[in-house]
């Protein structure tokens, strides 16, 4: 049951251009979404998050857009830099009260070419 | 920047042996989690822990798994009798709130069962 999907396993972008990573979800109970960056053999590093009451959140070069009606979110990186090359995971949670688990997508490998 | 610390970074064990993976969450965090990532697959939730008890566990977290917070700082995952399919990266995470805010992952323990 893939509740969070990242349909592009990889993306290649030129340095300085925009990178757009997409994520779709199926569970309408999700109310908090996060993007993580991950290098091999390291833990996921938090990038940016968005609550379901918003449709956009921006932090420096990173902007996350949420379209609740389409159950779609995207991460924009502008301008892309070679150091951004990594696997990007989107994750979603539905706060149930005590704690919440994150449901991860399968990841998108971003390669930023110099 | 506060960190979640995991030890060891790599553990090799024989099938059927018990292993304990250790984590030191961020000191003011109250919610603790274990996730795992089998090579080439997505990051999967195992268990969440709050107020000295398990809040939620996945179907992966069967009777062979247990968690403990023995001394107020460490958070451990024990696998009683390891199987080959337990080979994975295991990530500890902690968060300051239950809604996903401040969700921080450790760098992981690579468990190899031979």
Image (cartoon, helix red, strand yellow):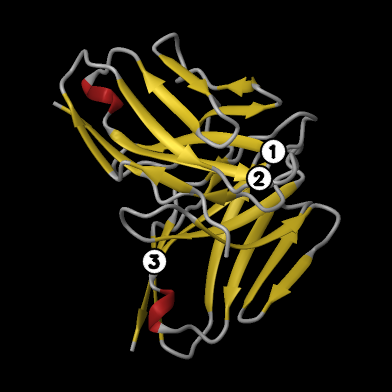
Mark closer to the observer (2, 1): 1
Question: In terms of image quadrants, where is residue B49?
Answer: top right
In this picture, is B11 found above or below B55?
A: below
Q: Chain of mark 1?
A: B
Q: Nearer the viewer, residue A108 or A33?
A: A33
- Can residue B82 be seen here? The reply is yes
Q: Chain of mark 2?
A: B
Q: Which mark is residue B95?
A: 2
Q: Which residue is mark 3?
A: A86
Taking depth in this image into account, of A113 and A58 the one nearest to the observer is A58
Q: Which residue is drawn at the image coordinates 63% and 49% (left, top)? A: B103
Q: Are marks 2 and 1 in contact (CB under 8 Å)?
A: yes
Q: Position of residue B16 (x, y in %)?
A: 21, 13
Quadrant that contains the C terminus of chain A: bottom left
In the picture of the structure, the residue carrying the numbered disc 1 is B30
**In the image, which is nearer the foreground, mark 1 or mark 3?**
1
Q: Residues within 10 Å of mark 3 (few under 14, many from 20)?
A: some
Give how far across and how far down residue B60 sits, in percent.
Answer: 45, 20
- Look at the numbered disc 2 and give the secondary structure of its residue: strand
Q: Is residue B16 above or below residue B13?
A: above
């Amino acid at each position: 049951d893939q509740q969070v999907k990242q349909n592009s396993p990889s993306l290649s972008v030129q340095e300085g251009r925009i990178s757009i990573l997409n994520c779709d979800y199926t569970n309408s109970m999700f109310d908090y979404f996060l993007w993580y960056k991950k290098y091999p053999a390291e833990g996921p590093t938090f990038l940016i998050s968005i609550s379901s009451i918003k449709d956009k959140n921006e932090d420096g070069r990173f902007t996350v857009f949420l379209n609740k009606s389409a159950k779609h979110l995207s991460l924009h990186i502008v301008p892309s830099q070679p150091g951004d090359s990594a696997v990007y995971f989107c994750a979603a949670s539905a706060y149930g009260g005590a704690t919440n688990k994150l449901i991860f997508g399968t990841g998108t490998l971003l390669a930023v070419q110099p | 920047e506060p960190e979640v610390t995991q030890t060891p970074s790599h553990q090799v064990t024989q099938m059927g042996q018990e292993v304990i993976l250790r984590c030191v969450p961020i000191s003011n965090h109250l919610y603790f989690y274990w996730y795992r990532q089998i090579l080439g697959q997505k990051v999967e939730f195992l268990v969440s822990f709050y107020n000295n008890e398990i809040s939620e566990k996945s179907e992966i977290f069967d009777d062979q798994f247990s968690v403990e917070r023995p001394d107020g700082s460490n958070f451990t995952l024990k696998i009683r009798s390891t199987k080959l399919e337990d080979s994975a990266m295991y990530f500890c995470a902690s968060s300051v709130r239950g809604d996903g805010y401040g969700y921080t992952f450790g760098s992981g323990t690579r468990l190899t069962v031979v």
